[in-house]
Image (cartoon, rainbow, N blue to C red):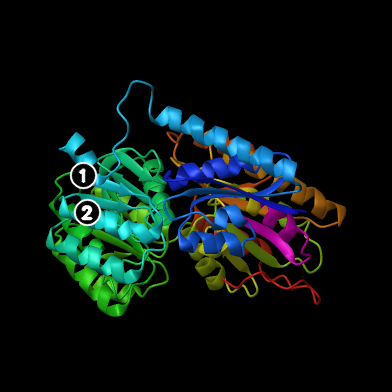
Amino acid sequence: MATTTCCLVRPDTYRDSVELMRVAALVEKVRGVSRAALMMATPANRELLSGAGLLDATGAAAGPNDLVVAVAAADRAAGERALTEAARLLDEQAAVSVPSGDKPAPLSIWEAVAECPRANLAIISTPGAYATAEALKALKRGLHVFIFSDNVPVADEVELKRLAAKKKLLVMGPDCGTAILDGVPLGFANAVRRGSIGLVGASGTGLQQVSCLIDRLGEGCSQVIGVGGHDLDERVGGLMMQEGIERLAADPGTRVIVLVSKPPAPAVARRVLDVARKSGKPVVVNFLGGDPAAIRGAGAIPAATLEDAARAAVALARGKKASTAPLAVAPKLAAAGRAKARRFGKGQSLVRGLYSGGTLCQEAALILDEAGGHGHTTIDLGDDEFTVGRPHPMIDFRLRNERILATAKDDATAVILLDVVLGYGAHPDPAGALVPAIEGAIKAAAKRRRGLAFVASVCGTPADPQGLARQETRLAAAGVLLAPSNAQAARLAASLVGHRRPARHRRPAQRKS
């Protein structure tokens, strides 16, 4: 419907990417606006905006130190209203960040360290092209680094992490979404209780799921160290996971160590597991889809799912024997699922996973494959290809809601599988944002004389700002079948379709998991 693209440029202005995503989401609520994006006008970002049809001549002329606001609107008037609203929100946030009478915020790492000489950690959230230089400055000042930025070249990551290893510092990231250090959450993280279980992971939502399940089981975390999704790449060599293990081994507050990642390259796995073996502490390892034999060979405990890893760690922290046998779906929940499955029509046979967390998405895909399902799909809507010019789906649910409604129209869809992630940085009311789409999809299916089941798990704790019980109650009232973990949700979804036969002429699947 958009016919006009409008851009506003703020010269020499930098804002945190999370703040920009929040403003973009609010601007898209302006009547007549279909898309909005706020980015630093680096060459790469201008190319992204251009590809998304969101760049006019004003935005194209912006420089890398400028902030560009881009909107697509039904007409010029709507576009101007959106730009005015964006300017108001940016000014409002600036006023909150620098209260009247306070000193202005430091403009460099040097100024920040001079102002706070006891600081030992720098958080970097610049466009990826500029993150390496800032990280190097921080490392040279003896600071640990948390790099939230993505699109940092792997060669730069190798350089940064080799330097950090020499200086016995941590580089978390690039593209690190989650950490909890000494009880302080960084990035997307949950309000988990303090305890004796230390986590190191190349997985943001994987760490969130394990830490939340540990909290729900009554234990807590000493440290949660995210190292970025590329750390166990052969080129990086697991340098920071090794550093993280050594730190947890030396930490008197850590009794049990948990490692979370996709399967590393064999040589990297050997190095990481050798460090784990030397830690002298019980280690639980969840390398999703990896070979458990190598883990057992290193004296560690392999866990097939994030839930299994959390349960094993809690048992060990309590001085008990760890069990990683998968949990069955609770009888009452399974019965509720069967009742919904009886309403499926002929040919409804497939599970469609629409995820905001990449690791949760991968875990569900593995479980659906193991259940013998063919044609099921899972999509990580937080993947870069879906977030060009859009906020992350843990913040903004519009893209996922559009997918829910579109997926429900596929006559082969029987189950829509979702994750709902709470915590700092996430949407303030995920259930409230999802329920209208869920109810709309169920009604649309009913008009076509078809049943439709929604299965989900909520990754969160009672202490999270969104309120775990409030979120679960809202989803359950909308008819969502709620499992206590992502693994159990995937198993329940697989069980509902069982060996149902697919429709002969169903619509094509979206993307194979």
Please give the name of the residue rendered at 38% of the width and 21% of the height, measured from the top-left corner. Answer: 100
Please give the name of the residue rendered at 57% of the width and 44% of the height, measured from the top-left corner. Answer: 24
Q: Quadrant of residue 227?
A: bottom left
Instruction: Report the span colored magenta.
Output: 401-419
Residue on which the image places disc 2: 137
Q: Is residue 232 left or right of residue 275?
A: right
Q: Is residue 459 visible?
A: no
In what element is the residue under mark 2? helix
Q: Indicate yes or no whether the magenta region holds residue 327.
A: no
- Choose between 156 and 399: the one closer to the eye: 156
- Whole-percent x and y of residue 470? 56, 33
- Which of marks 2 and 1 precedes in the sequence? 1
Amino acid marked by disc 1: Trp
Q: Indicate yes or no whether the magenta region holds residue 417.
A: yes
- Choose between 52 and 477: the one closer to the eye: 52
Instruction: Determine whether 50 is above or below 479 in the image.
Output: below
Number of the label disc, if any, that sits on residue 308: none
Residue on which the image places disc 1: 110
Q: CA distance from mark 1 to mark 2?
A: 8 Å
- Whole-percent x and y of residue 278? 14, 65
- Choose between 465 and 390: the one closer to the eye: 390
Q: Is residue 480 left or right of residue 230?
A: right
Residue placed farthest to the top in the image? 101
- Whole-percent x and y of residue 497? 68, 65
Is the C terminus in the top left, top right, bottom left or bottom right quadrant?
bottom right
- Whole-percent x and y of residue 114? 17, 38
